[in-house]
Amino acid sequence: MTHAIVDPETMGDFLSGVWKRNLEWRHYGVGFEFLRMTNSIVKIEKYRASSKDANSIHLTWSFGESLREQLKFGYVMKITHSFGDAPSSSNKQNGGRIANNNPNNKSNYLLNLQWQYSGEQCTGYYHMKTSTLTLNFILKDSCVTFIYRVIDENTMSITCIEVDEDHTPTIQFGQMCRLNMKKYSKVLESAKK
């Protein structure tokens, strides 16, 4: 499954859905002091922003504690190919034209990710060879980096480093599992009874 992600469309197809995210939080330091465990819902929905933007996919990320409650909007992420972003000698030799067939061009294995969070432009990449999604939130008073490693079609492992000027840095790690909404809806219905 992980090698099937080759372009913005297949990345959007893979990420779309409802996920359960479980993280363990620890201080990032000598003792790695345990802080807490968190469980949250992440809902990712795919859409095309406009017909002018046919080479990219947009995903809306929403977060919450339960599907029983309204999820909180997080951000809209734009996914595009990274072809031609990294300068290479073949680009120069071709008069500046993009040479997508060069197997040594690392851009051939990346998808660009862009979004805004708290008024700041954020960036990331999906690396096709390692099935790894890296999200960088460089904000005014903090830096947060998430690394999602695609394990299979329903599971991702997560590592997160969060640093700000007021707190001890934290490391968060855990997993994100896709929810089977048919089964989950039955559980929600039976819980209401």
Image (spheres, rainbow, N blue to C red):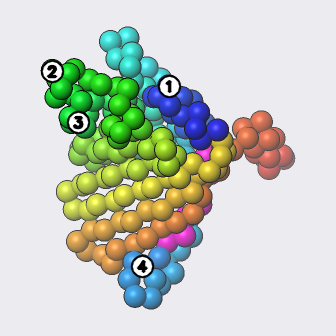
**Which residues are drawn in magenta?**
18-25
- The kind of secondary structure element at disc 1 is helix
Q: Name the amino acid type tagged 1.
A: Glu
Reading the chain from its start, which is encountered first: label 1 or label 4? 1
Q: Nearer the viewer, mark 3 or mark 4?
A: 3
Q: Residue 144's quadrant in the figure?
A: bottom left
**Which is closer to the viewer, label 1 or label 4?**
1
Residue 104 or residue 70, whichever sits in front: 104
Under circle 4, the secondary element is strand
Q: Nearer the viewer, residue 128 or 136?
A: 128
Spatial CA span between label 3 and label 4: 41 Å
- Pointer 3 residue: 88
Tell me which numbered mark, 2 or 1, is placed earlier along the sequence. 1
* x 64%, y 38%: residue: 1
Q: Give neighbour class at mark 3: few <14, some 14-19, many 20+ (Cα, 10 Å).
A: some
First reached walking from the N terminus: tag 2 or tag 4:
4
Query: Which residue is labeled 2 in the image?
Result: 95
Amino acid type, residue under disc 3 in the picture: Ser
Residue marked by disc 1? 9
Q: Counting residues from the N terminus, which is met first, the one under dot 3 or under dot 2? A: 3
Give the structural element (helix, strand or loop) at label 3. loop
Q: Give the spatial CA distance, label 2 vs label 4.
A: 51 Å
| Amino acid type, residue under disc 2 in the picture | Gly
Q: Earlier in the sequence, mark 3 or mark 1?
A: 1
